[in-house]
Image: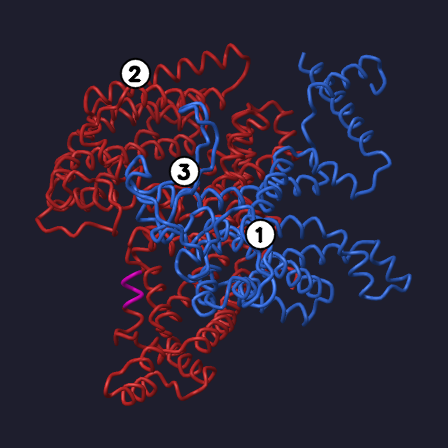
Chain colours: A blue, B red
Amino acid sequence: MAKRNEKVEILKEANENAIFNKETEGLSQGQIVLRRFFRHRAAMISVVVLFTLIAVVYTALDWRIGNEKDPYIIPGWWKYGFEDMPELRYGADCIDGSIGCPTIDAVPLLDGDGVSLGEHPFGQDDIGRDYLALVMRGAQRSILVMFIIGAIAATLGTIIGSIAGYFRGWVDAILMRLVDFIITVPVIIIGSVIGFHFGNKGAAFLALLLGLFSWTGLSRLVRGEFLTLREREFVDASRVAGASNRRIIFKHILPNAVGVIIVSVTLLMSGAILLETALSYLGFGVTSPDVSLGLLISNYQDAFTTRPWLFWYPGIFIIIIALCINFIGDGLRDAFDPRQRRRLSRKEKANARAMQNRGEFA
Amino acid sequence: MPLETCGSRSKLKLNVGGEEMFAYILRRLGALVVILFGSSFLLYNLSAISTDPLADLRLSDAQNRDYLIQALTRELRLDLPPPLRYFIWLRGVLGIFVGNPNFGLTREQQPVVDTIIEAIPTTIRLVAVATIVAIVLGIALGITSALRQYSRFDYGMTFFAFLLFSLPIFWVAVLLKQYLAIDFNDFLVTAKISPPWIIGLSALTGFFWAAIISGSRRRVFMIFSVAFLANAIFLSFLSATEWLSYPRLGPVAIFIFSVGIAFGVTYLSVGLSDRNALKSNLFMVLIGTILYFPAQSLLDSNRPRVGILTLLIAFLISAVAVSFIFARIDRGPVIRTSIITSVLIWGLILIDQMMQAWRPFVESDDVNYRPVATIGQSTIWLSETSFWVRVLDFAMHLVLPTLALTLISFAGYIRFSRGTLLDVLNQDYIRTARAKGLTERTVIMRHAFRNTMIPLTTIMVGDVAGIVGGAIITERVFAWQGMGTLFNKAINSFDLNLLMGVILFLSTLAILANLVADLLYSALDPRIRVGAGK
């Protein structure tokens, strides 16, 4: 019995292999990766959610372009700006008697009013500023910081890692000592030191500086990839053929390391948004009058018992953004991993069995 | 047998690699000094260039403003450029090699070393407990998840881990404060669990076990019902007896739990078919239950610390003695399982002792029926209190910060141990082990689990740096007086000496943790030799 089971097992494996091979026939590496990524359901949902969120967040508020005095304004879809101070609703306006209560009505069944946003969907803060506008502004800042850190860290980490891994020797030694200097200090500490002194210079500048200190982990990974890839035959072949160092790095090695880089950059970005919010929470990040999600939570954590919405909304936005990025990273990792096998659907298994019965592969 | 090869392997290593290893450690320690030098230079200058300790004074309108500015300039050597100041600071620090270190004074004229040494135990307590809980829970869940790959439980765990990855710790901490401290304390006043809660919690437990064990639809339904019913009865019992208000284990409950522990430990470690081990463990349970009675007076005496230690020694000795009675040729595994069981029973008795201190603790004026604390690392006792009440107090203050830290760090362990175990299960030696007819338990626990632990050591130790970073935020939320508080203070008061002291301590910790990780890795995995290839 056991022997028979084993035989069936082997047959099954052969069939599944055949299915996978058939699927990837005639496709380039990039197409295979893309296909695998599109199949990752959680990652695809995350891509859709994240891009919708970014679109919604960045079109919510007015954009002011041009000089300070006479700006050209592109109106946003939301009526209030994050600096506007409409009248604070309290007393009779709020059913529960709180100050600046939220007016969002997302549950149509309970009171039969249907879904509506109302005057201030997320409520108002202490001085009457519309909380939806504040959260949108905060999310804009956090996403901006995330992308800047990701871009800078990706560029620096890739360049430094490839140089160190490709040229080895003293170049490698010097660069890796530099990495050691930075990597040994917990990132929240470097972030706080930078943030405390430069946080008031704006979110973009803060992100730029944080990016200058976040490339170390990536550069180590890239260096490791380069150390193994540069010993491979195809690199020797291109060197014999007379390719320059630059050509070997960019045309031959880097494309093979791109999976590692993309995956670790996505994970770095989800770390970056948490870093930014944590720094703002500690008071070392984005400072008022500008707004960030961490700053909002920090300002209203004591109001949790009386006005919980001031605490919930910014937190939920952080989690949605970070969660989407993490799932996208996971999808990319699966897509780039050649060993990765997806689980066959029931239909495909039935097909495999049918093929086996017809004796096509057995 | 895997055990024997394990032993001979490490002996071999010691003979060959002792000297090599020593040289390697020395070289790494040398590198540590260089790295610390570099990173401290970097951070010193970064913070020195960008800070202006005189900013407050420049804006003040005190009469002796110019004099104050001059005095502070002289005191902090602000007339010198930052790199020069760094070397003055470094000269003091390098005194560590001649036994006379000088880390400078804080702005309040306290020696930096004293301030830091005062704060270390608090942070270590927080970090250590959180790390241990995260490791144990994370590995257990990760491994279960891997063994049930592609099941509902696996997908649930994956989502859960990603959710935890994405949570800002300060946000979680505030939620915990509200729901597990304020609301839970309110609940503890009556300790009556309402029927909706009983049903909800029981359903949750039912889903959990049904998802883990899984199988055919009928089996899943059976497991769900059994788990649901058992849990509902258990919770109703707790509610009816007001157990949560008057917690106590007592000899009967300890006996029942111990029997469970004995079976569990035996099953996981050597398998229930090993009758000698099972007998030895069950006999240990009997001794443990008997030891419970003399333990009461021992632990309640004037010197409870001595009592705890004496009890532990008594347990260990009886475990070894019992194993010698029951073991035939398999002395090793029997002794090992008996010792694990005895230590766990010892822990149960200590927990029982803490529970006995619950009422005096809750009723005292300083606690006043709010047992789960949200602020500080311990209560400042105004009245005389016993040892066990103080222990309980420490524990109750630890609950929330530890939970917050654990929640954000154990997602990494879930993912990593799942991935590693899946990799290991695909290896040829696992196929060999299965092919030669070993039981699934032996394959998983002996061959797969042990090899999973090897790469896990790297992230375990490497995680220390990350968890210290989390501790900085956690301390802020829960108002603990540890390294995080010092760090905040140092930055906000432009206290360069204190700041550098904290950074130096934390980065030394991180580098040492890395070194330990590498050494552990090479000790556990013979394929990796430290210092090779240079």
Q: To which residue does mark 1 refer?
A: A75
Same chain check for tags 2 and 3: no
The stretch in magenta equals: B115-119
Q: Is residue B499 left or right of residue A38?
A: left
Chain of the residue under label 1: A
Q: Mark 3: which amino acid?
A: Thr
Q: Mark 1: which amino acid?
A: Pro
Pinpoint residue A215: horizontal percent, then vertical percent.
Answer: 60, 61
Q: Is residue A357 magenta?
A: no
Can residue B194 be seen?
Answer: yes
Pinpoint residue A265: horizontal percent, then vertical percent.
Answer: 62, 52
Q: Mark 2: which amino acid?
A: Ile
Cβ atoms at labels 1 and 2 below 8 Å apart: no
Residue appearing at x 49%, y 21% in the figure: B213
Q: To which residue does mark 2 refer?
A: B233
Mark 2 or 3: in front is 3
Q: Residues within 10 Å of mark 3 (few under 14, many from 20)?
A: some
Is label 2 in a helix, a strand or a loop?
A: helix
Chain of the residue under label 3: A
Residue appearing at x 54%, y 16% in the figure: B215
Q: Residues within 10 Å of mark 1 (few under 14, many from 20)?
A: some
Relative height, residue B40 to residue B61 (above, below): above
Number of the label disc, if any, that sits on residue A103: 3
Pinpoint residue B349: horizontal percent, then vertical percent.
Answer: 23, 33
